[in-house]
Image (cartoon, helix red, strand yellow):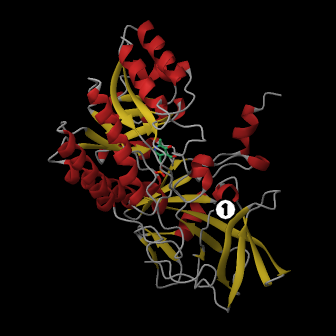
Amino acid sequence: MLETTPAPEPDGTTEGIWSLNTRRTDAGDVEVAGVRVLDIAREFGTPTYVLDEADIRGRARAWKTAMDDAFADLAGAEVYYAGKAFLSKAVARWMAEEGLNIDAASEGELRTALAAGVPGARIGLHGNNKSDAEIELALDEGIAHIVIDSLYEVDQVARLAAARGKRAPVYVRLTTGVHAGGHDFIQTAHEDQKFGLSVTTGAAQAAIEEITRRESLDFLGLHSHIGSQILSTDGFGKAAKVVLSVRQWAAEQGIDIPEVDFGGGYGVRYTSDDDVPPAPSDFAAILREAVREHCQETGLPAPRISIEPGRSIVAPAMMTLYEVGAIKDVQTDTGRRRYVSVDGGMSDNLRPALYDAQYTAAIVSRVANGEIVRSRVVGKHCESGDIVVHGVGLPSGVESGDLLAVPVTGAYGRSMGSNYNMLARPGVVAVHDGKAYEIVRRETIADQLALDVG
Ligand SMILES: Cc1ncc(COP(=O)(O)O)c(C=O)c1O
């Protein structure tokens, strides 16, 4: 555990928040997997995402083991790593080496997984508005499944598969009506939103019947994703029951559904105020129970199960390393607040601006002394909502030039990053066994100018 700056807002320890191999050295600075952050900053610059390779692999393995154990005596299980959280060739390769498959949601994610050597048969394709090119690529690469999100896509996938003389393996994404998640924008299974086909209105059942009428579609499974940053198992159990009731309905119509995917959304701890999330084995147990009951009650054979965790695998394994610049004290209605500016911001982590997401931070280049000051870490963008950490206690001795790290930035940080204000997006440096190496190189201003053809 990293011995960190005491933090009154949010306060308490940050136990379980820093990546597994993060430690404070005797000299007072911080190292990850035996590499000092001072050396990472010197060699690769700041801001930089620092990814603890052993940690991300361990989290992937934990999901695989939990699901394999839970479903060994049923029809087995697959874990698809949700590449939208963060994907690079190295990460796709590590996931495959740990026995996971990849969930891709665009041509870019699909091509990244393929470029890493992951075969199409170990990739699933998502999206509510897939292009013909994305579907054609998926079919040509022998994709494991394409998740159909609308009646429009039933036609689209059937037409493209028929033109290639193929049968497309498809799932149907269900809207189960179960709400879960940390923020409205990431609650995806209620009715009034863009994803999936409603079970309540019968839209999903109609799509299933239509799919089974199409020669060029091979109907394999049902899919549900109920939200994101979910810190309890309840929603998964409820959604699983709805999904499995559709499987029972289908069986009554003579339609066999051999596979079921319960999606992602498993939460992590961003600050010490957050609850400790259930373990992968807890989530797996809830899903197993729902499947076992369904089989017992209906007499149907067990389906093969899959899930799609993203955040819970990559978020805690990565931190963002910044350099402190301008520091300013502001008088507010509730007292003094110190604004500590860093050399990145909403272009490397949009979540605080987009979802009001809470993070914590610590000075990692030394032990900064002094009384604890109510502080806000902000970026360098021309936007007052450009906040990196809303509230954290930092020692009064923090100075320009200090390195400040924000933990748990692995998911939806780099992948939602932008070039706002024409900032170059940071690279990703992996650390393992005392070695640091870039897996995604830092962008340069020259990269941006190369796109500007005048
Ligand atoms: C269909 C689907 N699967 C998996 C995920 C991954 O979710 P998480 O990173 O919260 O596990 C998402 C996230 O939005 C999703 O939409």
In-front residue for pair 200/217: 200
Q: Position of residue 169 (x, y in %)?
A: 35, 23
- Give the residue displayed 52% in from the left and 63% down from the top: 408
In-front residue for pair 22/175: 175
- Give the residue displayed 47% in from the left and 70% down from the top: 18
Q: Position of residue 374 (x, y in %)?
A: 71, 83
In-front residue for pair 7/432: 7
- Regarding residue 94, the answer to whether it shows in the image is no
On-image quarter of the N terminus:
bottom left
The image shows residue 215, relative to residue 400, as above or below, that is above
- Give the residue displayed 36% in from the left and 12% down from the top: 166
Q: Position of residue 76 (x, y in %)?
A: 21, 43
Q: Position of residue 357 (x, y in %)?
A: 62, 62
- The secondary structure type at the circle numbered 1 is loop
* Structural crowding at the residue carrying mark 1, measured as other residues with C-alpha within 10 Å and reported as few (<14), some (14–19) or many (≥20): some
On-image quarter of the C terminus:
top right
In-front residue for pair 411/215: 215
Q: Amino acid at mark 1?
A: Asp
The image shows residue 245, relative to residue 352, as above or below, that is above
Quadrant of the rendered image containing residue 57: bottom left
Q: Which residue is mark 1?
A: 356
Determine whether the beta carbon of the residue marked 1 sits less than 8 angstroms from the nearest atom of ligand 1. no
Say whether residue 279 is left or right of residue 421: left
- Regarding residue 109, the answer to whether it shows in the image is yes
* Residue furthest left as drawn: 73
* Number of marks present in the image shown: 1
The image shows residue 4, relative to residue 323, as above or below, that is below
